[in-house]
Image (cartoon, rainbow, N blue to C red):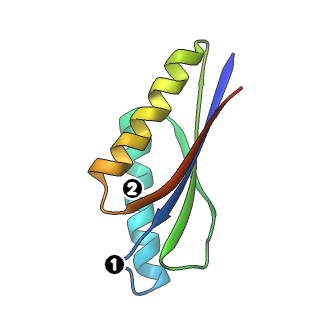
């Protein structure tokens, strides 16, 4: 069994309040969860309205598949979401 963890550092430049941030982050989490069948949660920067840190987890019996899914999530966030991806880190165990 292989566990892949991806941490995404995001900048949400258009937000003016925590309420807006929560709406954007919830929508993005739901789309990623439904599209890639991964677990995702906001794990840091909970009270900063222009920053978000998301943790994405994928479990599989093939490490290449796990890495592929997490890489697709990163590409999706870079191109398909209205946020700036500042940094990301992928770890496969």
Q: Secondary structure at mark 1?
A: loop
Query: Up-down: is 18 above or below 28?
Result: below
Rendered position, 47 above or below 11 = below
Q: Which residue is mark 1?
A: 14
Q: Residue tagged by mark 2? A: 28
- Residue placed at 37% from the left, 49% from the top? 77
Dot 1 crowding, Cα within 10 Å, few <14, some 14–19, many 20+ = few
Residue 30 placed where, x, y %?
A: 41, 50
- The picture places residue 9, in percent across and down from the top left corner, at 54, 59
Q: Give the Cα separation between the discs numbered 2 and 1.
A: 15 Å
Which quadrant: the C terminus? top right
Q: Residue furthest front?
A: 87
Q: Quadrant of residue 74?
A: top left
Q: Secondary structure at mark 2?
A: helix
Q: Do we see residue 37 in this rendering?
A: no
Q: Eyeballing the image, is 2 above or below 7?
A: above
| Residue appearing at x 52%, y 71% in the figure | 51
Q: Position of residue 60 (x, y in %)?
A: 59, 19
Residue 33 appears in the figure: yes
Choose between 86 and 44: the one closer to the eye.
86
Where, quadrant-wise, is the N terminus in this rendering? top right
Q: Position of residue 89 (x, y in %)?
A: 59, 44
């Amino acid at each position: 069994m292989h566990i892949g963890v991806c941490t995404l550092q995001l900048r949400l430049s258009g937000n003016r309040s925590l309420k807006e941030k929560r709406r954007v982050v919830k929508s993005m989490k739901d789309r990623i969860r439904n599209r890639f069948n991964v677990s995702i949660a906001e794990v840091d920067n909970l009270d900063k309205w222009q920053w978000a840190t998301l943790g994405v987890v994928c479990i599989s019996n093939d490490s290449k598949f796990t890495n592929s899914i997490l890489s697709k999530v990163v590409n999706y966030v870079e191109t398909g979401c209205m946020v700036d991806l500042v940094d990301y880190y992928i770890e496969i165990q």
